[in-house]
Amino acid sequence: MTNRKEKLSPAQILVSLDSAQDSKLTGRLYSGFYRKVYNFNSETELLLAMDRLCDSMQFPQASFKSRSFESKYSKTFVRKVENFMESEIDTALQQDRATFLVHIKFRQNASWQGSITWVEKEKTKNFRSALEMLKLMDEARHPAVKEVVDWEETT
């Protein structure tokens, strides 16, 4: 997508991450279907926005009904998305950021399955869950860092 002048297909989501200042993911999510952009400030906001985008497009269809702690009459908070132009995508691709083209093919087993393309490196990987997709994004942001949690006691 960096060398080609292509538009986002309706099924594609472009995720542009800000430079890694701390451990959380921040950036913008571009929808090819709605031609809008959503700013996110955490992994949770990114995942919820992508899930709600799929729900609103009704594609891919979820194979389960989400569980919720909410009551039947809960208050809804609405965050508006902004319109974007192709030049905004070009600008995002030219900046020193990690940019990903995500194609969610299935929403099964309470997660997502699909493919993710790291635009700058032109590498594509399939993912089997939203967590695996986030791990691939994090690996692209910090390629030389392999975090290991040590659960054993040290004295």
Image (cartoon, rainbow, N blue to C red):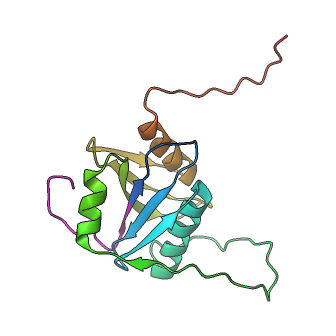
Residue 4 vertical position relative to residue 153 in the rendered view, above or below? below
Q: Position of residue 80 (x, y in %)?
A: 52, 81
Q: Please state which of residues 54 and 48 is positioned toward the viewer in this rendering.
A: 48
Locate the N terminus and report the quarter of the image it occupies: bottom left
The residue most toward the bottom is 73
Residue drawn at point x = 28 percent, y = 45 percent: 120
Q: Verify whether residue 4 appears in magenta.
A: yes
Q: Quadrant of residue 84?
A: bottom left
Q: Magenta stretch containing residue 6, yes or no?
A: yes
- Residue 112 lies, in percent from the top left, at 52, 59
Q: Position of residue 94 (x, y in %)?
A: 25, 52
Asked if 51 appears above or below 78 in the picture, the reply is above
In percent of the image, x 59 and y 63: which residue is there? Answer: 45
Q: Residue furthest front?
A: 21
Magenta residues: mostly which secondary structure? loop
How many numbered marks, from 0 up?
A: 0
Going 35% across and 70% down the picture, which residue do you hit? 11
* Residue located farthest toward the left when viewing the structure as drawn: 4
**In which image quadrant can residue 12 be found?**
bottom left
Q: Quarter holding the C terminus?
A: top right
| Quarter of image, res 71 | bottom right
The residues colored magenta run 1-14
Q: Position of residue 141 (x, y in %)?
A: 44, 40
